[in-house]
Image (spheres, rainbow, N blue to C red):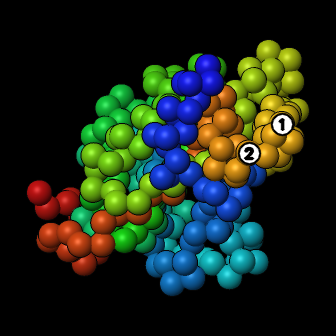
Amino acid sequence: MIGGLKKFIEIVSPHISDTCSKQMNSWDLLLENNPVNATRILDFGCGDGSTINFKELQENGKVSPLWIGLDISNSNKNNDIQSVVYDGNRIPFQNSVFDIVYSKQVLEHVRFPDDTVKEIVLVLKPGGLFIGSVSHTEPYHAYSIFNWTPYGVIQVFKNADIDSIQIYPGIDGLTLFMRRFTLGKLGNYFFIHESPLNLLVSAFGKACGKTNSEINAIKLTVCGHVCFVARKRTKVNNFDTFSCLNISKKK
């Protein structure tokens, strides 16, 4: 176990924070990384839009003039989001038009995730951010197909014109199992507050003199959600600046 953990830390250490070891979620990462001058955000797999808090964005002075929700059906109930329906395969926008693509707990439901990540990166501007989260040890939910390991996130993203990947531990897997079988919606509290196992890992790590990077790595081995911020390469070919709505990408 110890040897395996050391190897895991060696693999993921270039992609995890050594300045902070707190539990993260995709929304907080968006608030922290959304540049004030972002003009277009794509919400990939937006669902009903209920998790998007524009008031909180306004309080942070980070409102995007154009927030587009993309999904395979239109169940959007948020008037601040412009909904676009697509076929679940080819994202119907021009290349290089979005400053940020945001995706909360969606990629575990996607049939061909490698292809989808490449599609997402295509519509990002050079230097644009892909921010979100995926399931790792979360139980089956809502037609989920795959669960992502932290290593898997790094490998798939590296193969999609990404030059910077940072991963963060989300809610721990044990709490998600408890939420499913005993806690119910009460367990939702731990999506935005440090979950029990993560608290224990933090206390243990600090008592043992572990670095933030090492504590993060331990949390990532048992996390229910892996959160990420990935940056598209700044130098790409065929930088398109066309209008992004209702126009198919050039190949």
Residue located at (32% from left, 32% from top): 112
For the C terminus, the quadrant is: bottom left
Q: Relative to 101, is 181 above or below?
A: above
Residue 152, picture quadrant: top left
- Residue 18, image x, y percentages: 64, 57
Q: Do the residues labelled 2 and 1 touch (CB within 8 Å)?
A: yes
Q: Relative to 83, is 179 above or below?
A: above
Residue located at (64% from left, 68% from top): 32
99 or 250, nearer to the observer: 99
- Residue 72, image x, y percentages: 41, 41
Tell whether 10 sits left or right of 22. left
Q: Which mark is residue 204?
A: 1
Residue located at (57% from left, 72% from top): 34
Inspect the image, locate mark 1, and give the three-letter code of the amino acid beneath it. Phe
Mark 1, other Cα within 10 Å: few <14 / some 14–19 / many ≥20: few
Q: What element carries label 1?
A: helix
232 or 10, nearer to the observer: 10
Disc 2: which residue: 210
Inspect the image, locate mark 2, and give the three-letter code of the amino acid beneath it. Lys
Measure the alpha-carbon separation of dots 2 and 1. Answer: 9 Å
- Residue 92, image x, y percentages: 28, 55
- Residue 60, image x, y percentages: 72, 77
Q: What element carries label 2?
A: loop
225 or 154, nearer to the observer: 154
The answer to whether residue 150 is seen in the rendering is no
Residue 204, picture quadrant: top right
Question: Looking at the image, which residue sits at the far top?
Answer: 181
